[in-house]
Image (cartoon, rainbow, N blue to C red):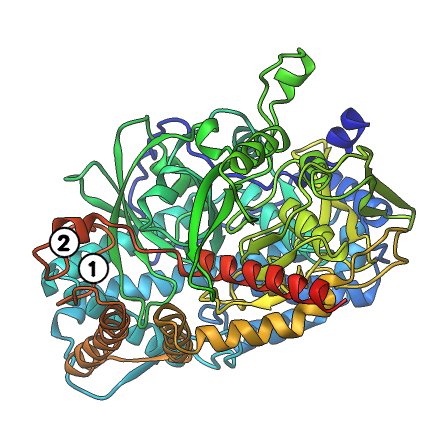
Amino acid sequence: MYLRLSKALSSLLLLTVIFTSTAAIAAIQDVSPGTPFTPLKPTREQAVTTQQILNNLLRGHYELQRLDDRLSSKIFDLYLEDLDGTRSYLLAGDVQSFEKYRKQFDDVLMRGDLTIPFFIYNRLQQRVNERLTFMLSELSERAAEYHFDNDERLNLDRENAPWATSTIELDDLWRKRLKNSILNLTMSGKDHKAAIELLQKRYQNQLNRIHQNKPEDAYQAVMNAVTRAFDPHTQYFSPRNTENFNINMSLSLQGIGAVLQGEDEYTKVVRLVPAGPADKAKNLHPADKIVGVGQNMDGSITDVIGWRLDEVVDLIRGPKGTTVRLEVIPSDSVGNDTKVIAIVRDEVKLEEQSAQKELLIIKGDDGKDHRIGVIDIPTFYIDFQGRMENRPDYKSTTRDVARLIKELRLEGIEGLIIDLRNNGGGSLEESISLTGLFIPQGPVVQVRSTRGNVEVLPDEDPTVLYDGSLVVLVNRLSASASEIFAGAIQDYGRGIVVGGQTFGKGTVQSLRPLRHGQLKITQAKFYRVSGQSTQHQGVIPDVLFPSLFDTDKIGESALEEALPWDEIRPAKYAADEQIRNSVVALRQKHQQRVQTDPDFIFLREQKTLIEEMRKQTEVSLNEKTRESERQENDQKRLDLENKRRKAKGMALLTKLEDESNPQAAKPETDDPEGIKKEEDDALLTESGHILLDFTELNLQRQAAR
């Protein structure tokens, strides 16, 4: 059964972009501003591939759809959104002229006729050419005389903005964008002249690149819209992207360890690989945007705004031990302010991704110290080769966790916490067998296929390794296999799930070869034994903790056209009702405790502040106002941090720590041990208190019988 599952459901392994080799960006000769864009034409091979893709989608996708006017309209809208999501290039007249094609995409694509989508793509490239020409003209002729003392403001959120009706209207928008870019650069330390020179290089590079575009670029854009109309995880990979995908899924784990995707002009961080260099550095975060890349600590930063994702990846690639510097826009930045961080490329070692244990000592309400075991599982892994060769010491999540539980038992633990925070998934088999350590023989997850057939995947081992009190800690980045495990533990009533709402990826993809590239297609959906899907909604914890993740940017619900949450018939399983009967009391005790807990007060207030900052969709182009707003935001953050530190008896900070150099700002203290001592993980500690609460409630119930 394992071989069958690993083949059919292998794509449960999340796409992991690891950078493995050095590649230089080829020099491109500068294109003169105003040079007309040469229209691209589709190839015969692309026409045949289009028909292949549509046949696969219409017959093999999980949600069977008809290629009709409704789907044609959806593809049309997604295509425009992909091409000009910020509504900054096309004019209202362009969009109006495209409307006659809205209900023709179904007819022409089925014939393999790409004339209409290529026409729209070429018009977009023409407008991009015009915008870049305008920006280069502004930089050379007027930008040196820009003033930053008026009350102009720039709206950064243009997703639903009306299309510009004239070139003059677009000129005004792009002039403000240019002022904002200059302001960002000068406020980060560059002088006005250097800022202009950098921006000239940026826009010249972008102009060069659009003139280097090939039919494959247009075709990729068209097919992205087609596949996205089915769901966000169904994708077309061109031959170049197929090569990158195969590298990403290989076992060569050397680089910075990050999952990236393109978003508008930027390269966005999706997640970090557990135990990878970026994860260890703790200076790069999900939803951050990479705008520049530099080699070593003294190399110049290459501006990568407007670059293709594969080009940015090529620039970040490098051998073990070398340093890459990234200029990033933090996810909570106001006004697209940037910072530069440094990461040393290294191997992602398998042993560092393995489950790890620790002993947590918590003082209970009775005043006594209680010993709680913690097992951190960064990913669901298995050494398939070692198992096939019958090696006695092959590694797997279940084998390692079983060993750690036995070791923790010898240390006298009273309960166990399984920490799945930031665990993006991995082997489906391991999520099932790991669940089996805590439940008797029975179903763990259900898989529903395209045709509606449901297969129940069980744990077939009747033994239970650990039957004590159990807590599962999750957050927004807990996905796929993590959600299967957490959902099963919750459905069986075997443990208390605490933390944040999980990611919500409950679909299964497979790869299908094409004449030109390959197609990743969604073919099945996961359901819990309760019948609820893990898709879109994820797992809702029994006790919710404050979360700083922006659910509008991170998670399945943040993806357009994500398949919906739904239910099927429950599997046959026996649930323990003790936790369900205790949830209300556990939540009340949790709320009482965290009302005065400095770390939870800090989390709640930090969340409120970040949400307020996210609502600031306009930025001032007045330098004094901008600097005042930045200082005010920094002061608010510093005040929150020092409020927490004061409540905990810690030394106060004089300024916010610089994440690119953690030693830059140190507490005002003479106690070196106080500097070195790591702060307690508040969420982990509170998870331990909830576990003790549950144990105490059970004892009270038993005494009352």
Judged left or right of residue 347, residue 259 is: right
Disc 1 target residue: 657
Disc 2 target residue: 664
**Disc 1, disc 2: CB below 8 Å?**
yes
Which residue type does callout 2 highlight?
Answer: Ala
Q: Residues within 10 Å of mark 2 (few under 14, many from 20)?
A: few
Which residue type does callout 1 highlight?
Answer: Glu
- Residue at 59%, 54% (x, y): give it: 471
- Residue at 39%, 54% (x, y): give it: 285
Place of residue 495 in the rendered image (x, y in percent of width and height, measured from the top left): 66, 54
Q: Is 46 drawn above or below residue 559 in the view shown?
A: above
- The one nearer the camera, 269 or 652, is 652
Q: Is 547 drawn above or below residue 42 in the view shown?
A: below
Place of residue 275 in the rendered image (x, y in percent of width and height, measured from the top left): 42, 38
Q: CA distance from mark 1 to mark 2?
A: 7 Å
Q: Which mark is residue 539?
A: none
Q: Quadrant of residue 668?
A: bottom left
Q: Residue at the far bottom: name it.
A: 151
Q: Quadrant of residue 312?
A: top left
